[in-house]
Image (cartoon, rainbow, N blue to C red):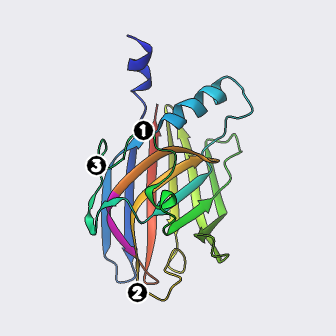
Amino acid sequence: MNLEDNTNDIVGHFRIELRKNDGTIEVFEEKNLIMDTARENMANLVGGYSLGSPINKFVLGTKGHIGTDVLTFKPVGSYGFNSTRTELFSEESLDYTYQIDFDTVSSNDIETDALAVGEMQGSGVTSLCSVTRTIFERSVKFEITIPAEAGNPIDGSNAIGYTEAGLYADNLLFSQKTLSVIAKDETSEIYVSWTIIF
């Protein structure tokens, strides 16, 4: 077995739920892409280098789809979606993003940050979100909840269509997922379960 065989074992599983006030739930789940910057960050962490950082940021974006078809997401290996990316497509094109910063400095197996701050693309309007991190054996699971009042359009439109998501270690993109549109408005909350398996 060579080094490449070992590093390719790192995988991620992404699940997002749009939980509507009427009780219905829309679900999208799939494996996600682990980025090259994640491997660099892990090397720094294992080596005790101060530049290594834990995952502490979650970002939703609106440009993970092909053209104007929000139901067809960009597949890995085409449309510029590969492991060398350093930011979401939305961040690259300066389109809408919703960012949640959270704290993961505790050494406990389970840590909940109920004061995680979410903000829509530099609007200055923030909302409290909930983030729980669970470490179990070879996996780290992040559970993120964006409440009904958060993550909604700030331009007066009915809903915002999210089609990509990313986990960051400070400013280093750790993993990315493109997805079929999740249309968020004030009548729904978003729940994300994102597990990284080593």
Which residue is most to the right?
50
Q: Is residue 58 above or below residue 186?
A: above
On screen, residue 165 versus residue 171, left or right, reads left
Going 38% across and 41% down the picture, which residue do you hit? 82
Q: Residue furthest top?
A: 1
How dense is the environment of label 3, judged by Cα within 10 Å: few (below 14), some, or many (20 and up)?
some
Q: Is residue 166 above or below residue 40?
A: below
**Mark 3, secondary structure of its residue:** loop
Label number found at residue 75: 3
Would you say residue 181 sits in the magenta stretch? yes
Asked if residue 37 is among those painted magenta in the image, a careful observer would answer no
Q: Main secondary structure of the magenta part?
A: strand
Q: CA distance from mark 1 to mark 2?
A: 34 Å
Q: Would you name the residue on which mark 1 appears?
A: 83
Q: Which residues are magenta?
A: 179-183
Dot 2: what SS? Answer: loop
Calculate the distance from the C-alpha at mark 3 to the C-alpha at mark 2: 28 Å
Along the line of sight, which residue is nearer the eye, 22 or 166?
166
Q: Which residue in the structure is indicated by mark 2?
A: 158
Residue at (36% x, 47% y) in the render: 80
Element marked by disc 1? loop
